């Protein structure tokens, strides 16, 4: 690498951060790299470090960047600023890509994506799962192009998922009662912990990952705030995809259940403790599998086509379904904490028509009887 190579700091109108630029003597192409800062002095220091790497031979042309090296860069420079849940969602897409295609170089990834989709289909992955994997890969590869780890931004085809149907279904109250009863058969040693966890999902509508980390401690990433007139959820930036802190509404029936179930002296640490047979904490996936075992023991099949039984997300669906007939769509979106109103409208608004119709017809019948009595009298 020539000793007189220079890395310059440049500012593009459409970017907040300064960019670093030099001409790659190995390919003759101009290379750019995000400095990671909008402060010019910090960008100049980053340029000096990069220039030193170039002159001392530590730099490796992006033309020869391996997939493994790129994955490390992507996780360190992009994913580390995201929530753990967001990070984890990329891991499945990346791990499957590596195991199914054996791709070694970053520049070869686009060429194996069609085969990747085909192999996922052969493994009978659901359309929604394949769609999710491809969306995550598209984010990673677009980032690679923007950071000049790839020479150009190539379109990534994302197949359609299933539009109209939920993967599972909401549970009826009687079915939920069967699940609670099945806990005593599946894991009797820690039945009280699991009944509390399932009841918490039923009343809260929390996602599995959220319920597992929900805490009474105010400094926790996801906690119960008891300081106001009404209890509410407090979600700190590190627990959110958006990286923004916020307070969220807590349903009144959940507040009442928590207040009566957990005395003030017990309100510290994790709210729920879904442990394993030996009493040790479980990972999110292990918790999900245990709930499905409980659902199967209770005989509650929620996805007959795929032979799947009640899951944590089915309990969240149950929560949304119950509140869908009580709230306007915009309010339901807030209590479900959906990113877009389209998700709320797609899966919950209009799905509770039988229950609402029954109440309306009952009210209409009562009114009709009263009107008839007044007319005849």
Image (tube, rainbow, N blue to C red):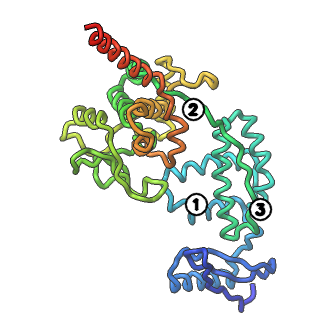
Residue that lies at the very extreme toward the bottom in this rendered image = 4
**Residue drawn at 74 percent across, 80 percent down:** 30
Circle 1 sits on which residue? 75
Numbered tag placed on residue 107 in the rendering = 3
- How far, Cα to Cα, is label 2 from label 3? 37 Å
Residue 176 place in picture, x, y as percent = 41, 22
Label 2 with label 3: CB-CB less than 8 Å? no
Residue 79 place in picture, x, y as percent = 55, 59
Which numbered disc flags the more N-terminal residue, 1 or 2? 1
Element type at marker 2?
loop
Determine whether, in the image, residue 26 is placed left or right of residue 323. right
Circle 2 sits on which residue? 166
Residue 256 image-quadrant placement: top left
Element type at marker 1?
helix
**Residue drawn at 38 percent across, 57 percent down:** 245
Crowd tier of the residue under label 2, counting other residues whose Cα lies within 10 Å: few below 14, some 14–19, many 20 or above? some
- How far, Cα to Cα, is label 3 from label 1? 18 Å
Front residue of 335/78: it is 335
Residue 112 place in picture, x, y as percent = 79, 51
**Residue drawn at 68 percent across, 64 percent down:** 144
């Amino acid at each position: 690498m020539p000793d007189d190579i220079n890395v310059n700091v440049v500012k593009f109108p459409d970017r907040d951060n300064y960019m670093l630029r030099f001409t790659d003597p190995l390919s003759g192409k101009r290379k750019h790299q995000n400095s990671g800062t909008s402060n010019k002095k910090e960008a100049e220091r980053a340029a000096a470090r990069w220039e030193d790497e170039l002159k001392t031979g530590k730099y490796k042309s992006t033309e020869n960047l391996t997939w493994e090296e790129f994955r490390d860069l992507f996780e360190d420079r992009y994913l580390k600023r995201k929530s753990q849940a967001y990070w984890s969602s990329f891991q499945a897409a990346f791990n499957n890509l590596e195991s199914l295609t054996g791709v070694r170089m970053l520049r070869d990834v686009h060429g194996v994506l069609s085969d990747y989709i085909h192999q996922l289909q052969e493994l009978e992955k659901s359309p929604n799962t394949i769609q999710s994997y491809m969306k995550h890969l598209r984010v990673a590869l677009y980032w690679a192009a923007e950071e000049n780890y790839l020479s150009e931004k190539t379109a990534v085809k994302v197949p359609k998922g299933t539009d109209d149907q939920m993967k599972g279904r909401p549970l009826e109250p009687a079915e939920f009662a069967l699940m609670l009863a099945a806990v005593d058969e599946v894991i009797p040693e820690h039945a009280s912990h699991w009944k509390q966890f399932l009841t918490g999902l039923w009343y809260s509508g929390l996602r599995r990952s959220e319920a597992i980390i929900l805490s009474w401690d105010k400094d926790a990433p996801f906690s119960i705030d008891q300081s106001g007139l009404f209890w509410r959820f407090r979600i700190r930036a590190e627990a959110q995809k958006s990286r923004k802190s916020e307070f969220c509404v807590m349903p009144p029936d959940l507040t009442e259940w928590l207040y009566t179930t957990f005395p003030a002296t017990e309100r510290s640490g994790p709210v729920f403790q879904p442990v394993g047979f030996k009493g040790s904490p479980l990972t999110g996936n292990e918790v999900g599998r245990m709930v499905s075992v409980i659902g199967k023991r209770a005989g509650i099949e929620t996805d007959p086509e795929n032979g799947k039984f009640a899951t944590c997300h089915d309990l969240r669906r149950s929560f949304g379904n119950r509140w869908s007939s009580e709230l306007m769509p915009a309010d339901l979106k807030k209590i479900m904490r959906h990113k877009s109103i389209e998700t709320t409208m797609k899966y919950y608004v209009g799905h509770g028509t039988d229950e609402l119709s029954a109440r309306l017809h009952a009210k209409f019948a009562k009114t009709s009887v009263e009107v008839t009595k007044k007319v005849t009298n």
